[in-house]
Image (cartoon, rainbow, N blue to C red):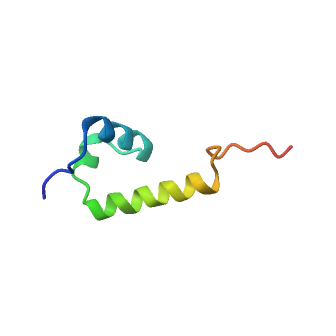
Amino acid sequence: MRPLQISPETAVKLSEKLGIPLEHLMHTPQHILMQKLAELAKEETIDPNGGESDKS
């Protein structure tokens, strides 16, 4: 399996957002990475404030 064809800057940003080591990200199969990105986008759409809400 070959590494993902993405720029180093994109790889670092994705690694931070997904919370996985850069080395693992680069060897993650593309279909799994796309699934994780879809889940992340869905979470951000549901709660754009990052989980911090003020319901007092």
Question: Which residue sits at x=32%, y=40%?
Answer: 10
Q: Quadrant of the N terminus?
A: bottom left
User: Depth check: 45 or 24 in front?
Assistant: 45
The number of numbered badges drawn on the structure is 0
Report the side of 37 relative to 2 (left or right). right
Report the side of 53 relative to 31 (left or right). right
Residue 8 percent coordinates (x, y): 25, 36
Residue 28 percent coordinates (x, y): 26, 55
| Residue 52 location, quadrant | top right
Question: Which residue sits at x=36%, y=45%?
Answer: 20
| Residue 54 location, quadrant | top right
Report the side of 26 relative to 52 (left or right). left
Question: Which residue sits at x=65%, y=47%?
Answer: 51
User: Depth check: 10 or 51 in front?
Assistant: 10
Q: Is the residue 35 above or below the residue 15 in the image?
A: below
Taking the view exactly as shown, the residue that stands out farthest to the left is 1
Question: Which residue sits at x=63%, y=48%?
Answer: 48
Q: Quadrant of the C terminus?
A: top right
Residue 27 percent coordinates (x, y): 21, 52
| Residue 35 location, quadrant | bottom left
Residue 30 percent coordinates (x, y): 27, 60
